[in-house]
Amino acid sequence: MIFEEEKKKEEKDDYLLVDLCESFVLLNDEFTSTEFLSICVPCLLKVALRKEEIEEVQKEVEMALLALSSIRDNDIEKELFLDDMTEIMKYHQEHRNLTRLAYQSAWQFLINRLFTDKRLEDMIVNELHFGREASRELEELSKSISSIK
């Protein structure tokens, strides 16, 4: 169904394609077809790039990022995801619009793809300020734990 929906030009239902990709990725973590990934990764990233502050949109973004993080295949070409995922992370750092699950899912997707790549380290240090974000998250966590006591 995913391949058939992708082939449609004028009548393509983007919502159906997103739902199919999310469902298939979440239920079939061992699937490694390059053709499948070349359809689903850009489709899910398109959803994850939405920046509206509407709760429904935020849930769609979170679901797309969660689905992306569950992809086990590490052979996805960087051109399919690197720029978009970097934009998602930067936008979140500026606007704090992602839930913790969505933010963690975005990082997991990146780390799973780039753990042996020097570019991940460069992105963390130069562009994403990972240490500052981790410190902020730990501060928030310690405040919430302190308030519980």
Image (spheres, helix red, strand yellow):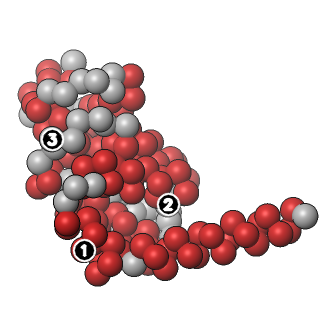
Name the residue located 46 percent from the left edge and 76 percent from the top edge. 131
Residue 8 is labelled as: none
Residue 74, relative to residue 143: is it above or below?
above
Q: What residue occupies the far front of the structure in this picture? A: 116
Label 1, secondary structure: give it.
helix
Q: How crowded is mark 1: few (under 14 residues within 10 Å), some or many (20 or more)?
A: few
Horizontal and vertical percent for residue 25? 32, 29
- Is 78 left, or right, of 106 in this rendering? left
Horizontal and vertical percent for residue 94? 44, 78
Q: Distance between the residues labelled 1 and 3?
A: 20 Å
Report the amino acid beneath label 3: Asp
Nearer mark to the viewer, of 2 and 3: 3
Label 3, secondary structure: give it.
loop
Horizontal and vertical percent for residue 71? 31, 36
For the image shown, how many numbered marks are present on the structure? 3
Q: Residues within 10 Å of mark 2 (few under 14, many from 20)?
A: many
The reply to whether residue 20 is in sight is no
Label 2, secondary structure: give it.
loop
Residue 98 is labelled as: 2
Q: Residues within 10 Å of mark 3 (few under 14, many from 20)?
A: few
N-terminal label among 1 and 2: 2
Residue wearing tag 3: 75
**Contact check, label 1 and label 2, Cβ < 8 Å:** no
Front residue of 6 and 10:
6
Answer with the quarter of the image where residue 90 lies. bottom left
Name the residue located 18 percent from the left edge and 35 percent from the top edge. 37
Residue wearing tag 1: 122
Quadrant the N terminus occupies: top left
